[in-house]
Structures are given as C-alpha cells and as structure tokens.
C-alpha cells in the first residue's frame, strides 16, 4: 500500500512508500538510519509549492510537526525556528521581538526550509533572496550526523547549504537575522509598456521594492511599489493602496492554480529579455492570459543561487494548472537561455549539469560538497541526479 500525494499545482503526483512526520531530531536520525538499512531514498517536503519533481517514491518527510520559534538573541537580531515553520508563522513572533524579515516573496505559504532551499526571493534591487537572511542552519546529514553551519565556523558549507534543494541533508533549524520591525505602504497602478520602459530605472531606484506584472490580454503593466512609512496602523488609504506591518503587506494570496517557469538574467539584460518574451507570447501564444512577472534581485555569494555573483532581473511565465504548459515554457526557456538565464530551482526548467557548470561558477564545488556529504545519493532522485550529473 503506497501513499498518493500531489504538489500545490498538481503538476507533481507521486506514490510514496510512506509520508513520515517526525516530531524531533532523534526521529529524523532514526528515519535516516532506517532508509540506509533498506537502501531507500529520502526527500523532504516543505509546503510542496515547487513545480519540479523533487520527490521520491520511497520515504517522503514532512516537518509539519516540527514548527515554531526555538530561541532568539536580541543583541544580534537573530531568531531560530524549527525548519518546518511556514513563512506566515514567522511574522508575528519576529514582530514580538521587534524584528521583521528584510524582504519576502509573493506569498507566505511555504515552509522556511523549503523556501530557502530553492532560493525563494522577492523584489527590490537592494535586497538579496530569502536564504541571504539566514545566519545559521542545523542539518542532519545522510550519515545521521548533525551539522551546525554558519559563516564563521564553516564558510564553504554556508555558501552551499542555504540553497541546496534538500540534497546536502535534512535541515532541522533555521536561524534568521531580522531587521528592526517596519511598516510598509503598498501602491498599485496600471501603465502602458512604453511608460514602463521609460520609468522603470527610476522606479527601481526610488522605491524600496518595485515590480510589475505584464498583462497579456490588455498589453498593460500592473505596477506595485512598497515603501517604508512612519504610520503604525493597518488601513487602506484607497482601493489601490494598503498600509500595515511588513509581513502583512509583502505577501499576497494566490487562489487560482498555475504552473510557473522563472529565470534570472543579468540585471542589464532584463528589459530586452522581457520584450522578447512579450513578443513571443503575442505572436505564438495570444490565448495565454496569465501574467509575466518582472522583479529585481541583488547578487549574492551562494554557490548555486540563481543570483550568485550577479545583480539580477527575474522574469516568470505562468500557465493555468489545467493546461499543458510545455509549448509556452519551451519557447520561453529558449529565450531565457539566449540571455544567460539561470533557472529558479523550484520552477519548471530543463537544465542539466553541463550547462549549469558553465553558468554558475560555484556549481562544480557544490557537486563536490554534495558528493562528500551524501556519497550514496540518499537525498537524490532521477531529476536531481541529472541536475548534479550523478549516474
Ligand atoms: C503560489 C506560489 C507563489 C510563489 N511565489 C514565489 C516568489 O514570490 N518567489 C520565489 O522565489 N518563489 C516563489 N514560489 C516558489 C516557491 O517559493 C519555491 O518553490 C519554494 O521552494 C517552495 O517552498 P516549500 O516550502 O513549498 O518547499 P517544497 O516545494 O516542498 O520543497 C522545495 C525544496 O526544499 C527542500 N526542502 C524542504 N524542506 C526541507 C528541509 N527541512 N530540509 C532540506 N530540504 C528541504 C525540498 O526537498 C525541495 O528540494 C512560489 C510558488 C507558488 C506555488
């Protein structure tokens, strides 16, 4: 009897031997020992919001029973959470400590370990991705050892482990470095593509966070900006604006199910790449109504982060979950490749080891670290083996 299971969008459907929900690190260590004895693979699910086949038919692990704040340090602004904690469960405990996350993505339904493991990010040219807000990780490796990974004690593991797709070990604790709690003022407005072209550099520079969604049906851009405010209450100044604590204002809700492809391109190539995606969709896919999202992201130093070593524009293409996205995504991926695109690890892509090794300078070193920590491939599956060139 196997367990039937599917991801958020329904794109990934699996039969697993079991879905384990450990309550402690000891239970995680026992599970890994059992998997080793049976020579089975282990893959961890956060909130299953990724669109790619990260999973296994052997042991799936969910840390849904391993959530919540463990400790905090007011001197350093750090707070340590169990790794299964959902992003929407971080805001209030951090706020009570006088802290906020520096930035967040479009939604807050993911687990903190799952979000960092794929390099989840928001927008804002001064801000790096969510894993950049992590100052320490605790992880159980395939051999059952516990590693505490931070910048001073293990700098190379630290560069590798924050974005690692669950291939180095099972993360049990995540320490975030917060910034002083802040309120934001959100504004939304519509603009033509020409206006967006003209204004985008100044909008990027003058707003804390700015992004737009290109709406194919009307060929217009739905702009969104977020800025710090002195106000300290939650309210809606108008239909298009909202004020409130950062953790309420940054994330939105996404009720309709879709599949998504997103690539990071060098910041200076972002607009040209977007224009090609737009032209391709107008010419070849006029029926697609799902928006294209355009965001900015500051470069970082993580080995396989999509923003590793370069300031970035991220562009994502969506398709309704009930429609095969392959024709649209294949056409988009060809354009992204021409712009030195790097895939978002949680979203649809077809990259394999050879091209990743060309695109990411830290990729080969990451593969060595992965091989050292998990020589038997306990945390691999066929999709990840292709990515890391493991036969
Ligand atoms: C509606 C929607 C909106 C989104 N918005 C954004 C956005 O704004 N920005 C963005 O960058 N991305 C976005 N994404 C993508 C999403 O943030 C990533 O796919 C993220 O990884 C999903 O988190 P999760 O908790 O669901 O993890 P999962 O999808 O369940 O897992 C992701 C990876 O993390 C690993 N993992 C999970 N827990 C652990 C653990 N404890 N230890 C080791 N490895 C672990 C998994 O094995 C897997 O490899 C969005 C996705 C959806 C569906």
Image (cartoon, helix red, strand yellow):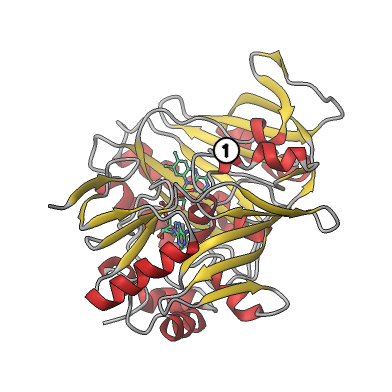
- On screen, 289 above or below 274? above
Tell me which residue sits at (46%, 46%) in the image: 316
- On screen, 125 above or below 98? below
Task: Examine the rendering and report whether any part of residue 39 can be seen.
Answer: no
- On screen, 309 above or below 126? below
Q: Position of residue 358 (x, y in %)?
A: 46, 78
Q: Indicate the quadrant where residue 389 lies.
A: bottom left
From the viewer's side, name the closer residue of 346 and 37.
37
Q: Position of residue 8 (x, y in %)?
A: 35, 41
Tell me which residue sits at (69%, 79%) in the image: 153
From the viewer's side, name the closer residue of 74 and 297.
74
Residue of label 1? 88
* Residue most extreme to the left: 1
Q: Indicate the quadrant where residue 207 lies.
A: top right
Tell me which residue sits at (25%, 69%) in the image: 382
Horizontal arrangement in the rendering, residue 65 relative to residue 235 (left or right)? left
Task: Examine the rendering and report whether any part of residue 206 can be seen.
Answer: yes
- Number of labels in the image equals 1
Q: Residues within 10 Å of mark 1 (few under 14, many from 20)?
A: some
- Quarter of the picture containing the C terminus is bottom left
Q: Position of residue 342 (x, y in %)?
A: 47, 63
Q: Position of residue 242 (x, y in %)?
A: 69, 22
* Residue most extreme to the top: 238
Q: Secondary structure at mark 1?
A: helix
On whether ligand 1 comes within 8 Å of the CB at mark 1, the answer is no
């Amino acid at each position: 009897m196997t367990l039937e299971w599917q991801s958020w969008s329904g794109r990934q459907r699996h039969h697993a031997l079991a879905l384990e929900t450990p309550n402690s690190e000891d239970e995680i260590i026992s599970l890994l020992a059992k998997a080793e004895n049976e020579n089975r693979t282990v893959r961890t699910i956060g909130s299953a919001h990724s669109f790619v086949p990260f999973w296994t038919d052997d042991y799936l692990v969910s840390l849904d029973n391993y959530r919540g704040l463990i400790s905090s340090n007011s001197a350093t602004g750090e707070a340590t959470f169990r790794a299964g904690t959902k992003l929407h469960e971080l805001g209030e405990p951090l706020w009570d400590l006088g802290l906020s996350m520096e930035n967040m993505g479009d939604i807050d339904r993911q687990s903190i370990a799952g979000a960092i493991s794929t390099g989840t990010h928001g927008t804002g040219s001064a801000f790096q991705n969510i894993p950049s807000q992590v100052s320490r990780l605790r992880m159980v490796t395939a051999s059952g050892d516990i590693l505490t990974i931070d910048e001073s004690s293990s700098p190379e593991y630290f560069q590798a482990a924050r974005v690692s797709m669950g291939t180095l070990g099972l993360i049990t604790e995540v320490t975030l470095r917060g910034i002083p709690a802040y309120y934001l003022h959100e504004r939304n407005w519509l603009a033509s593509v020409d206006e967006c072209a003209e204004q985008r550099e100044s909008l990027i520079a003058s707003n804390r966070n700015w992004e737009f969604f290109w709406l194919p049906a009307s060929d217009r851009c739905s702009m969104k900006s977020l800025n710090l405010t002195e106000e300290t209450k939650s309210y809606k100044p108008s239909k298009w604006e909202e004020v409130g604590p950062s953790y309420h204002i940054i994330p939105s809700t996404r009720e309709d199910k879709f599949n998504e492809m997103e690539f990071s391109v060098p910041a200076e190539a972002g607009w040209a790449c977007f224009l090609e995606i737009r032209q391709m969709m107008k010419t070849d896919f006029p029926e697609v109504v799902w928006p294209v999202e355009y965001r900015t992201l500051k470069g970082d130093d993580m080995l396989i982060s999509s923003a590793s070593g370069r300031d970035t524009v991220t562009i994502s293409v969506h398709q309704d979950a009930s429609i095969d996205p392959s024709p649209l995504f294949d056409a988009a991926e060809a354009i992204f490749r021409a712009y030195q695109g790097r895939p978002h690890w949680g979203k649809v892509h077809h990259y394999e080891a050879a091209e990743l090794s060309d695109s990411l300078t830290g990729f080969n070193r990451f593969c060595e670290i992965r091989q050292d920590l998990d020589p038997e491939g306990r945390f691999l599956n066929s999709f990840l083996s292709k990515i890391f060139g493991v036969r």
